[in-house]
Image: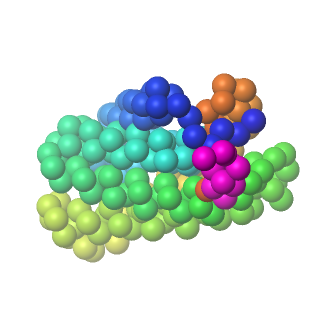
Amino acid sequence: MLTGKPSSAKSVSIIAMTAALYAVFFYVSSIVSLSGFTLLYLPVILLGVFPIWFGWNGLAGSMIGALIGGALVEGLGLLGVFEVVTAIIIFIPNWVFLPKNSFKQGLKNLAIPIAVYGITLFIGTAYILWQYSVIPKLWDIQFAEALLLPEFAVNFVIMAIVCPILYRVITPKLRTWGIYSGNFAEWRSQRSKKPA
């Protein structure tokens, strides 16, 4: 069962939970990072499943978690907003372009979601590497270009393997609990069916 609009209490709970998970995943990623900057890693898992699971509430939580990660974990203060922009760049296209039922069994059904993940992740990774080479000029643009493909590859492997598994395992429970949003088209369809 899809729910078009969860109650206010559910919405706040979802936002708080997604923000906390994002911040924790951000912190754990920074521990294993050589540079002290996460350049995504574990948060990409959340950016792959939160759009479909939680919709707008997941976006709000991801933005808060990204700000906490950038400001406190990476020590960027207000420049942590760049991590928020990266979360938006990856989250919204995933929510809009991941097709309904794209995680059904079989490799054929995974082709479109994996392609969507690849495109959004590449753009998000390129953005954050470019941004940090401009403001606060943590490295030069040549270093950012050299990091792009390796950072993208690591994140893509994590996202392409873990997200479909999580989606298949956790989605049935979220539907049962009435907090599953669906992709953007599903969410919009459910909203239009709700009585005013």
Residue extending farthest to the front is: 196
Q: Main secondary structure of the magenta part?
A: helix
Q: Residue 76, image x and y in percent?
A: 16, 48
133 or 190, nearer to the observer: 190
Q: Is residue 76 left or right of residue 86?
A: left
Coloring basis for residues: rainbow
Q: Quadrant of the N terminus?
A: top right
Q: Residue 116, image x and y in percent?
A: 62, 63
86 or 58, nearer to the observer: 58
Indicate whether residue 177 is drawn in magenta: no
Q: Residue 156, image x and y in percent?
A: 55, 55
Asked if 8 appears above or below 119 in the picture, the reply is above
> Which residue occupies 34% across, 58% down?
85
Q: Residue 73, image x and y in percent?
A: 24, 37
Asked if 136 appears above or below 154 in the picture, the reply is below
> Which residue occupies 56% across, 35% down?
6
Q: Is residue 87 left or right of residue 195?
A: left
> Visible in this render: residue 165?
no
Q: Is residue 95 left or right of residue 185?
A: left
Asked if 10 appears above or below 74 in the picture, the reply is above
Asked if 178 appears above or below 36 in the picture, the reply is above
What span is in magenta?
185-196
> Which residue occupies 39% across, 67% down?
126
